């Protein structure tokens, strides 16, 4: 097992248990002690990731542009998934860069828009039943800053760019990237003759678009509520069938279930959320220029809220504030 996989499993097992330490409180009304254990904060833990979406949304307010937004999804063909699984860091990085360059090149074409767009890109590697399926979700602003930086070019709703054109450019650029990495000979020739899947979907504007993307950023392969039972060495979980559009059940041996989950643990320190174009940190001055052309005033940074430590808790039974007694030391994680 890879070190990153072992670390993820150890974190999930110890999350919100005495192993990580925590705090002890006393309810004077119920006359009972309550324990609040620390979270592991691992990005693959189903208990921790669901709490971070709101915090992320607040930080992304500076990217907002008063324009329609689109969700563009680039999917890696099935014939390349074996290579992606065996060379994850190389192929994942390639997938994110090539998809972003494809979209920016097409959008720079005057036939479609003719300027620089803003892109927020997220890597996802699973289907709803935990199978390996690498693809990239992109939140793209429906407009662009002109090449001379003097004009904001608005897209004509509900149209961004033709999916077939994006697919052809994507395939060509990915083939060139594989050739530069000396990996092209590992791919069957039929891949370059088929259509590469790119989906474009209008998702509204402003904050609603960010809220649409937030689950893709903090979602992990499976959540606790989808796991129904562990019985006789088998795990039963539910998933929604995209084609039949109804809920299905999957039953897997424990080892097979863990295998499916762990294949979605990304390489150590791999960044799965990246920004390009106007949203790139290097181009924030261009983003501000675009906002000025649209007429959006500068957003004042809100004062940072200090964290209350230790956190204030109320009794789950009587709802009264509890008295803080002290801190529980952590026992330390397994090596």
Image (cartoon, grey):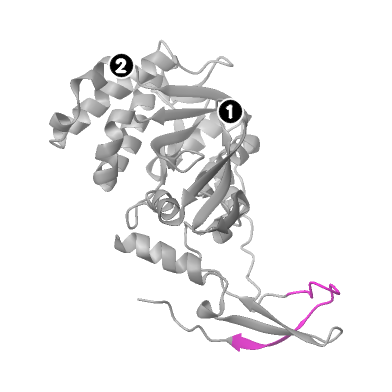
Question: Which residue corresponds to the image point at 57% horizontal and 48% vertical from the top-left?
Answer: 237
Q: Position of residue 226 (x, y in %)?
A: 60, 49
Q: Is residue 271 visible?
A: yes
* Callout 2 touching callout 1 (CB < 8 Å): no
Q: Is residue 109 visible?
A: no
Q: Position of residue 290 (x, y in %)?
A: 51, 31
Q: Position of residue 138 (x, y in %)?
A: 46, 33
Q: CA distance from mark 2 to mark 1?
A: 41 Å
Compared with 16, 152 (above or below) is above
Report the residue marked by disc 1. 294
Query: Majority secondary structure of the magenta segment?
Result: loop
Callout 2 crowding tier (Cα within 10 Å): few <14, some 14–19, many ≥20: few
Report the residue marked by disc 2. 194
Magenta range is 313-327
Question: Which residue corresponds to the image point at 45% horizontal and 29% vertical from the top-left?
Answer: 73
Callout 1 crowding tier (Cα within 10 Å): few <14, some 14–19, many ≥20: some
Asked if residue 326 lies in the magenta stretch, the reply is yes
Question: Which residue corresponds to the image point at 42% horizontal and 77% vertical from the top-left?
Answer: 333
Count the labels in the image: 2
Asked if residue 213 lies in the magenta stretch, the reply is no
SS at badge 2: loop
- In this image, 159 relative to 320: left or right? left
Question: Which residue corresponds to the image point at 38% horizontal and 66% vertical from the top-left?
Answer: 7
- Indicate which disc residue 32 carries: none
């Amino acid at each position: 097992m890879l070190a990153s996989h072992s670390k993820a499993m150890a974190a999930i097992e110890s999350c919100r248990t005495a192993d990580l330490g925590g705090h002890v409180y006393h309810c004077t009304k119920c006359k009972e002690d309550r324990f609040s254990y620390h979270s592991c904060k691992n990005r693959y833990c189903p208990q921790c990731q669901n709490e971070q979406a709101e915090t992320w949304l607040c930080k992304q307010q500076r990217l907002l542009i008063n324009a329609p937004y689109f969700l563009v999804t680039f999917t890696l063909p099935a014939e390349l998934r074996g290579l992606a699984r065996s060379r994850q860091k190389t192929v994942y990085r390639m997938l994110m860069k090539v998809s972003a360059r494809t979209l920016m090149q097409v959008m720079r074409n005057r036939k479609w828009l003719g300027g620089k767009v803003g892109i927020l890109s997220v890597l996802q590697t699973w289907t709803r039943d935990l199978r390996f399926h690498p693809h990239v979700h992109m939140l793209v602003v429906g407009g662009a800053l002109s090449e001379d930086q003097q004009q904001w070019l608005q897209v004509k709703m509900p149209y961004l760019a033709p999916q077939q054109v994006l697919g052809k450019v994507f395939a060509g650029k990915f083939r060139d990237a594989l050739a530069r990495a000396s990996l092209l000979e590992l791919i069957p020739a039929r891949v370059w003759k088929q259509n590469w899947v790119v989906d474009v979907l209008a998702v509204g504007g402003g904050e609603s678009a960010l809220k649409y993307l937030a689950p893709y950023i903090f979602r992990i392969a499976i959540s606790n509520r989808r796991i129904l039972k562990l019985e006789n060495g088998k795990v039963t979980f539910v998933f929604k069938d995209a084609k039949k559009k109804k809920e299905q059940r999957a039953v897997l041996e424990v080892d097979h279930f863990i295998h499916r989950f762990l294949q979605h643990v990304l390489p150590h320190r791999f960044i799965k959320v990246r920004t390009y174009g106007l949203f790139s940190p290097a181009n924030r001055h261009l983003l501000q220029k675009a906002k000025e052309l649209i007429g959006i005033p500068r957003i004042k940074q809100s004062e940072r809220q200090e964290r209350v430590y230790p956190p204030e808790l109320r009794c789950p039974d009587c709802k009264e504030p509890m008295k803080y007694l002290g801190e529980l030391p952590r026992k330390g994680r397994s090596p």
